[in-house]
Structures are given as C-alpha cells and as structure tokens.
Image (cartoon, rainbow, N blue to C red):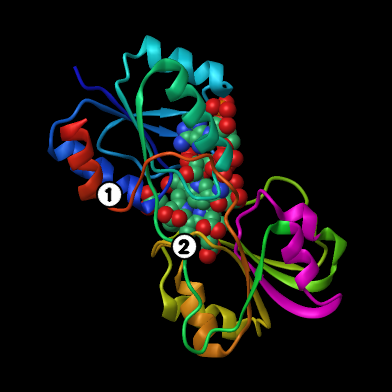
C-alpha cells in the first residue's frame, strides 16, 4: 500500500501536493514549523522536526511510509541529508523534487560566493545599501559589517533585537514579482543584493529587478547534499510514484 511523505516548504512542494490530492494519493505534507502561519495544504499536514535521522526512521516505520519526496528548498541541506540516511536505513524509496540553479544572464552582474561567510566578505566595509533577501536564519553573520544599511525581508516579524544596527525590515512572504521588487529596491536606493541560489520562480523577482536597475548580486552557491534521485517536475514525480 503506497503512503507518501512529502517534505515541503517550497512552491514546487505545494504544486505537487495539489496533484497528489487530485489523484487521491495517501500522502502527508511536512513543514519544519519555521513560520507562524504556513500556507495550508490539501493533504494532511505535520509540523516540526522529526528528531534527526533516528526520529525520521521511527516516523517512516510507525507511519508505514513507502515513499518520500524531498521537495524542500535547496538550502535545507540538513533535512535533505537526513532524508537520504533515514530512507536508506528504513528501506524506503526516496526522490528529490529540486529546481535547477539560476544562471547569470545577459546584463547580470553576479559575484558568486560559496557560502554565507563569502557573501559577507563580498560586501563593502561601509556605506552600502544591501537588500539582504535570505530570510532571518543567517542574519547574525552580517554583524561583522554593521556600517552598511540592510533592507531585510522576513516572513514573520522578528522577536527581539536584530543583530544589525542599521536596518529597514519588510514583513512579506513570497512568491514576489519583479515590478514590486524593482520598486522596493529603487525606493531604498539599493546598491547590492544578497541572494541564495534557490532557483525556481518564487524568489527570482529580485534577480530581474537587480538586472533592470543594474544592481550587482552577491549569489550564494547551494550547499552540498548527498546523492539521491533528483526529478525536476511534478509530472516526473507522479510518474515515479506510479512506477516505483
Ligand atoms: C516555512 C512556508 C509555497 C512556498 C513558497 C520558494 C518560494 C516563496 C521565496 C526573498 C527571498 C527565503 C525564505 C523564501 C521564498 C517561497 C516559498 C520561499 C525566500 C515559506 C514557508 C516556510 C519558509 C521558511 C523560510 C526560511 C527562509 C526562507 C524566506 C509558509 C514562506 C529567504 C529563502 O523567518 C524565517 O525563519 C524564515 C525561514 C527558511 C530562509 C532563512 O534561512 O531564513 N524560507 N518559507 C517552511 C517550513 O516550516 O517547513 O510559511 O507558507 C515558503 C517559501 N518561501 O508553498 O508557496 O519555493 O522558494 N523563503 C531563499 O530562497 O532565499 C525569500 O525575500 O526574496
Ligand atoms: P534545514 O536547516 O535543512 O533543517 C533543519 C532541521 O529542520 C531538520 O534537520 C529537521 O529537523 C527540520 N526540518 C527541515 N525541513 C523540514 C520539513 N519539511 N519537515 C519537517 N522537519 C523539517 O531546513 P531549513 O533550511 O531550516 O528549512 C526549513 C523549511 O523551510 C523547509 O521546509 C524548507 O523547505 C523551507 N524553506 C527553506 C528555505 C531556506 O532558505 N533554507 C527557503 C524556502 C523554504 P529534525 O532533524 O528534527 O528532523
């Protein structure tokens, strides 16, 4: 009997959830519980971590999961690594639904860095106006360059003080559109954008906006994730489920 665990948190995960619901598949949608009010899904949902690899193995066994689709964000590297290890241990089929990285195009001025520390290093010491569109989990490492102005876009209002002294905070959840991001960046006189190479469409508005405004982008490469089967579209995943 097929029972699917969908590790979500991305636009593609939500699109797959709709297809699974329409197909009447027995599936559970899983969020980390990172935000206050996650978008609801047409599948039964669970919130919160599993408790590492061991917790996930226990969940797979006790819930009778036969297939895992890892549709988490390319930067959710810990979850993806845990899924590889737990599915191998529990003998459960695994595939990832992962979008391609963005490539710099005509008129783009990207500075590619390998990780968040590299992004901090790529910024001026002072006087820059930086659109820091990387969420809230990694803000503290930018505190070594406090003399820039940072425009922060967060999903939820921050609890307590931010680690940066000179900020403007926008509370918004994507997906975003290019015109909106261009107006936002022009209004704030942005001189640099810092972005994760998330791929997909939900976060790419700021790339288009930066291109239109001639603003350089500090682009953070994706973290390493262990090998697993990677599919690129919802359709491929539906076919994989039918044939595996
Ligand atoms: C909790 C679920 C959907 C999924 C929508 C996508 C698109 C909009 C763009 C910017 C960049 C950023 C951030 C972003 C985008 C989609 C997708 C995507 C980037 C939600 C969601 C959860 C999260 C977690 C959140 C992180 C943060 C990252 C904001 C829901 C809305 C910056 C990634 O405040 C926090 O702690 C936020 C944490 C992880 C990165 C970080 O490290 O801070 N996503 N984002 C998921 C869970 O609990 O399991 O609340 O509804 C989902 C989406 N966010 O169904 O339509 O597919 O990527 N999410 C990045 O790409 O750089 C915003 O502002 O331009
Ligand atoms: P992460 O660093 O890879 O994972 C840290 C821990 O969070 C995992 O070990 C796991 O806890 C728990 N976790 C992560 N995703 C989960 C899920 N879908 N269901 C249940 N538990 C989950 O993850 P992250 O980067 O914080 O991302 C968290 C969520 O936000 C994911 O759903 C991801 O798709 C979404 N998201 C992330 C980004 C981003 O930039 N990182 C962008 C957009 C959306 P246990 O070890 O206890 O199981």
Mark 1 residue element: helix
| Residue 204 visible in the current orientation | yes
Instruction: Return the mark for residue 15.
Output: 1
Where 66 sits versus 139, above or below? above
**Which of the marked residues, 2 or 1, is nearer the chain's N terminus?**
1
10 Å neighbourhood of mark 1: few (<14), some, or many (≥20)? few
168 vs 238, nearest the viewer: 238
Q: Residue at x 60, y 50 (%)?
A: 223
Q: Position of residue 55 (x, y in %)?
A: 53, 17
Could you tell me which quadrant the C terminus lies in?
Answer: top left
Q: Nearer the viewer, mark 2 or mark 1?
A: 2
Residue 180: where, in percent of width, then height? 45, 77
Query: Is 133 colored magenta in this rendering?
Result: yes
Q: Is residue 86 left or right of residue 26?
A: right
Which label is found at residue 101? 2
Compared across the picture, whether 82 is left or right of 11 comes to right
């Amino acid at each position: 009997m097929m029972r699917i665990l969908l590790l979500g948190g991305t636009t593609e995960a939500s699109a797959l959830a709709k297809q699974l619901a329409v197909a009447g598949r027995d599936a559970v949608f899983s969020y980390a519980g990172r935000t206050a009010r996650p978008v609801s899904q047409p599948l039964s949902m669970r919130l919160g971590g599993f408790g590492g690899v061991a917790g996930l193995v226990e969940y797979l066994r006790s819930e009778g999961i036969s297939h895992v689709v890892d549709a988490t964000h390319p930067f959710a590297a810990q979850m993806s690594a845990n899924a590889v290890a737990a599915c191998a241990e529990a003998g459960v089929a695994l595939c990832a639904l992962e979008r391609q990285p963005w490539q710099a195009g005509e008129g783009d001025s990207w500075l590619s860095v390998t990780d968040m520390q590299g992004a901090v290093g790529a910024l001026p010491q002072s006087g820059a106006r930086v659109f820091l569109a990387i969420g809230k989990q990694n803000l503290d490492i930018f505190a070594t360059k406090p003399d820039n102005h940072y425009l922060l876009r967060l999903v939820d209002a921050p609890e307590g003080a931010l680690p940066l002294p000179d900020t403007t905070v926008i509370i918004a959840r994507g997906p975003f559109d290019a015109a909106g991001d261009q107006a936002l960046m022009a209004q704030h006189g942005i001189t640099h954008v810092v972005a994760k190479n998330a791929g997909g469409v939900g976060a790419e508005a700021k790339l288009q906006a930066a291109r239109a405004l001639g603003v350089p982008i500090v682009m953070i490469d994706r973290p390493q994730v262990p090998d697993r089967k990677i599919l690129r579209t919802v359709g491929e995943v539906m076919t994989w489920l039918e044939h595996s």
